[in-house]
Amino acid sequence: MTAAATFRARHARGELLVFANAWDPGSARLIESLGSPAIATTSSGVAWARGYPDGDALPVDVLIATVGAIARVVGVPLTVDVEGGYSDDPDTVAATVMRVVDAGAAGINIEDGNGPPERLAAKISAIRGAVARAGTDVFVNARIDVHLKGIGAPETRAAELAARIARYRDAGADGIFVPGLTDPTGIAAAVAAAGPLPFNAMALPQLPDAATLRALGVRRLSAGGAVAGAAIAAAAGLAEAFLKTGDCAALFADASPTWTYGRMNALMTR
């Protein structure tokens, strides 16, 4: 099976796929070694690790190099957050996605952000056409930002979300991702609106636990930028304390630095 076919098959099992999103080849290889059946990237973590802000600011050539570098070190399917596709032009976005696929991706996330829903629908349609012409495949996870960005009045968001789900499904999306939606009633309604398409939730403090999400019919759960953010926060705390005092003790408060060196070196030796 191709990577994309393997990735589709994992969605078809009906289980909850959990993604602890990676941001570079090292984090991807580490997450794979912990048993993850696929690797998903986080756009924020990828951008920060390369010195860019999140939000379609990452140069496409840098994205492609990152995808290729991650694909080189992992043996499981890779799905890549391409933000809004780095362009408003559907054909340009489709060409970028084909480069992502050629670099080793089996799937993508692509978002509507603050843009009109017809724009993302046109991008998805263009991607589907480009993939068909190339005789290849990619799993397109359509991210809807109605809740994450607070688009429209609260009482209108459920109807807007349902309309966007239908629009993106008709355009050729394979999955639906709604970050920011955390209440069980709203999640259940969105899962029903998605129909056969796998529904993806994003980790937030208010999100129900995994068992509840499974019962609601959620099929994917992403950490988003949370793991990358926690790693950055931990590094910042250690670095700040070391810079202030020069005291080494906090750097070796547990055995993790020694464990990490040997384990990571072994993981990177393929």
Image (tube, rainbow, N blue to C red):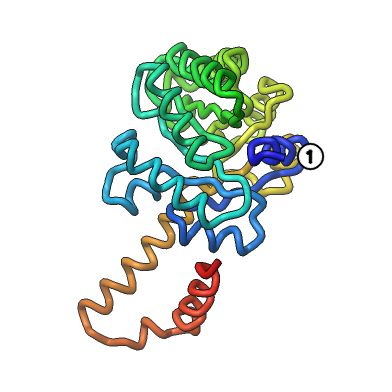
Residue pictured at 53% horizontal, 48% vertical: 223
Q: Amino acid at mark 1?
A: Arg
Q: Visible in this render: residue 59?
A: yes
Q: Quadrant of residue 95?
A: top left
Q: Quadrant of the C terminus?
A: bottom right
On screen, residue 208 above or below 171: below
Q: Quadrant of the N terminus?
A: top right
Q: Visible in this render: residue 155?
A: no
Task: Report x, y in % for residue 72.
Answer: 51, 53
As drawn, which residue projects farthest toward the right? Answer: 13
On screen, residue 235 above or below 179: below
Task: Report x, y in % for residue 173.
Answer: 59, 22
Q: Nearer the viewer, residue 249 or 152?
A: 249
Residue 183 relative to residue 60: left or right: right
Task: Report x, y in % for residue 77.
Answer: 61, 45
Q: Nearer the viewer, residue 105 or 115?
A: 105
Residue pictured at 46% horizontal, 57% vertical: 25
Residue 44 relative to residue 14: left or right: left
Residue pictured at 67% horizontal, 20% vertical: 193
Q: Secondary structure at mark 1?
A: loop
As drawn, which residue projects farthest toward the front? Answer: 134
Disc 1 marks which residue? Answer: 13
Residue 102 relative to residue 13: left or right: left
Q: Quadrant of residue 89?
A: top left
Residue 191 relative to residue 244: left or right: right
